[in-house]
Amino acid sequence: MMTETASSKIFKLFQKAKKIAIFTHINPDPDAYGSAFGVREMCKDMGKVAEVFAVKNPESYLDQIFPLTELKTKFSAEEFDMAVIVDVNALSRVHQSFREEISKAKTVVVLDHHLQGEEFTNNQLVDTKMAACAQLVAHFMLDNGQTITPKTATYLWAGLMGDTDRFLHSNLSHDVLEIGLKLYDAGADTQFVYDKMYRTNSLRDIALQRKFFANTKFNSGKTAGFTIFTQKDIKKLGIDQEMIKKFTNCIVQLDGVLASFLAIEYEANHFKISIRTKGLDARSFAIQQGGGGHVCASGFNFDGTKKQLRRNAKKWCEEILKMK
């Protein structure tokens, strides 16, 4: 749990600043956007000028949850008193169009829950015990006497649902449920979030799901599988990486399947691998590959061709079954 001293120290920086720029990682997911817009609303309620900066992906269900038309894309450090980075503590994972100006910012603050990071600012509030950055932001607000409005609660609820998948992942804890209850009591529109994230599928989603299963290969016992999406696939379908991630759990939900790997190509020959398991230690496996995460939901990066990836994935399917 974050210490009160660290939380109050960071909050004083928010109090001091008048204009605040908020950033997150490349290809933002629900937790990234939920945390970013949650922080923006907190700043506005404090009487600050606050803007969220991100490079928007092609239209997806995220557009229906978050006000992505309000995203800013041109950032000048001299126009803001402080830069806040949420859901990532590595400047290299922020979009390259913002990095140089962020490095010039008077004050840089990080709010995050990931283990990996870079020492580019001393003003970091990071708690790896948190299941989602939205959970950390909620704590940050409550610990410093800030009221969570219904709009803020809805943004943070979407972030919490995104990183716990409706409390299905092994990162579930008493605190996750308690924060969820506090967001609910604060007026989070939970039904709205569920409808947009889980109960609404477009024809494009259905086509993507077909492609997802068509791309999946299994081991001989059909207890582990892997799915690969290249940039060519993504372009042909007219989608973005985040839309694919919506179906990350599809394979491991199949009866008899204990583990699955989803590989998405973000840059030429650079893939991000998401692991999902039923009771197997995905985190230890990911750490062996230079990544990390949670017991049943982890990930790592892979650099190589699709052919090399396919060859490795076949081995991973056998190896992860040994991770008890």
Image (cartoon, helix red, strand yellow):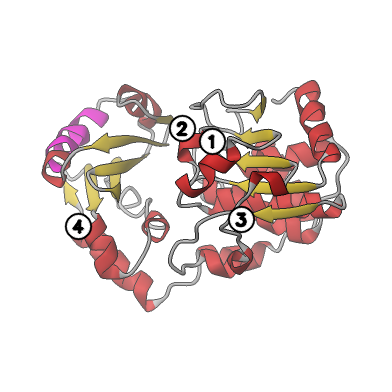
Q: Which residues are magenta?
A: 310-320
Residue 311 within the magenta-colored segment of the rendering: yes
Q: Tell me if residue 147 comes above or below residue 125 in the rendering.
A: below
Say what amino acid the circle numbered 2 marks.
His
At mark 2, the secondary structure is loop
Q: Dot 4: few (<14), some (14–19), or many (≥20) neighbours within 10 Å? A: few
Q: Please give the residue where the numbered disc 1 appears in the rendered image.
A: 171
Q: Which amino acid is tagged 1?
A: Asn
Q: Which circle's residue, 1 or 3, is located before the other in the chain?
A: 3
Residue at 82%, 28% in the rendered image: 8
**Residue that badge 2 annotates:** 294
Magenta stretch: helix, strand or loop mostly: helix
Spot occupied by residue 87 in the image (x, y as percentages of width and height)? 57, 40
Question: Contact (CB < 8 A) between labels 1 and 2?
Answer: yes
**Crowd around label 1: few <14 · some 14–19 · many ≥20 (10 Å):** some
Answer above or below: position of 292 versus 96.
above
The crowding category of the residue bearing disc 3, from other C-alpha atoms within 10 Å (few below 14, some 14 to 19, many at least 20), is many
Circle 4 SS class:
helix
Looking at the rendered structure, the secondary structure element under dot 3 is helix
Q: Which residue is mark 4?
A: 215
Neighbour class for label 2 at 10 Å: few (<14), some, many (≥20)?
some
First reached walking from the N terminus: tag 4 or tag 2: 4
Q: Amino acid at mark 4?
A: Asn
The earlier-in-sequence mark between 3 and 2 is: 3
For residue 158, the mark is 3
Q: Where's residue 32, x and y in %?
A: 56, 48
How many labels, in total? 4
Contact? badges 4 and 2 (CB < 8 Å): no
The span from disc 4 to disc 3 (Cα, nearest Å) is 29 Å
Residue 42: in sight, yes or no?
A: yes
